[in-house]
């Protein structure tokens, strides 16, 4: 069996990262999808090197990380 902890996708800007988090909230709140886990997204955190990220669960309960690398400006 092949398993992994989470997938990570990189946003091209810090603004886009915030948009993706807001979009997840809108989709969750729309009631159009049934989520296996109902935990909301984490806050966007900023690492010491400036990299920003947040985590969410998709409809199947798979953990997804979205990040903006500080060098991607
Ligand atoms: Fe990660």
Image (spheres, rainbow, N blue to C red):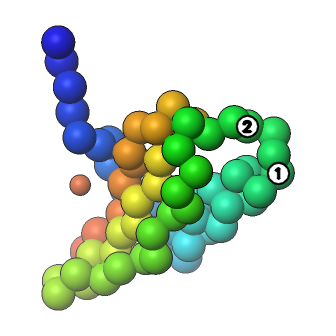
Q: Is mark 2 within 8 Å of ligand 1?
A: no
Q: Position of residue 41 (x, y in %)?
A: 51, 63
Q: Is residue 1 above or below residue 12?
A: above
Q: Are marks 1 and 2 in contact (CB under 8 Å)?
A: yes
- For residue 20, side relative to residue 25 (left or right): left
Position in image of residue 11 (x %, y %)? 44, 60
In the rendered structure, the answer to whether residue 50 lies left or right of residue 38 reads: left
Q: Quadrant of residue 67?
A: bottom left
The C terminus sits in image quarter: bottom left
| Residue at the (18%, 18%) spot, across then down | 2
Which of the four quarters of the rendered structure image does ligand 1 lie in?
Answer: bottom left
Q: CA distance from mark 1 to mark 2?
A: 8 Å
Q: For the residue labelled by badge 1, is the local secondary structure a helix, a strand or a loop?
A: helix
Residue 16 seen by the camera: no
Q: Is residue 5 visible?
A: yes
Look at 23% across and 40% down and name the residue there. Answer: 5
Identify which residue is drawn at 65% across, 67% down: 22
Q: Position of residue 19 (x, y in %)?
A: 62, 67
- Return the residue at label 2: 33
Q: Examine the rendered structure and indicate whether residue 15 appears above or below residue 32.
A: below
Above or below residue 15? Residue 37 is: above
Q: Residues within 10 Å of mark 2 (few under 14, many from 20)?
A: few
Q: How many marks?
A: 2
Task: Identify the image quadrant of the N terminus.
Answer: top left
Residue placed under numbered mark 1 in the picture:
30
Residue at the limit of the structure toward the top, as seen here: 1
Residue 15 in the image: above or below residue 64: below
Left or right of residue 2, residue 60 in this image: right
Badge 2 marks a residue whose secondary structure is loop
């Amino acid at each position: 069996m092949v398993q992994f902890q989470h997938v990570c996708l990189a946003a091209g800007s810090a603004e886009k990262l915030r948009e993706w988090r807001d979009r997840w909230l809108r989709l969750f709140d729309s009631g159009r999808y049934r989520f296996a886990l109902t935990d909301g997204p984490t806050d966007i955190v900023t690492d010491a090197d400036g990299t920003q990220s947040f985590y969410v669960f998709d409809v199947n309960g798979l953990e997804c990380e979205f990040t903006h690398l500080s060098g991607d400006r």
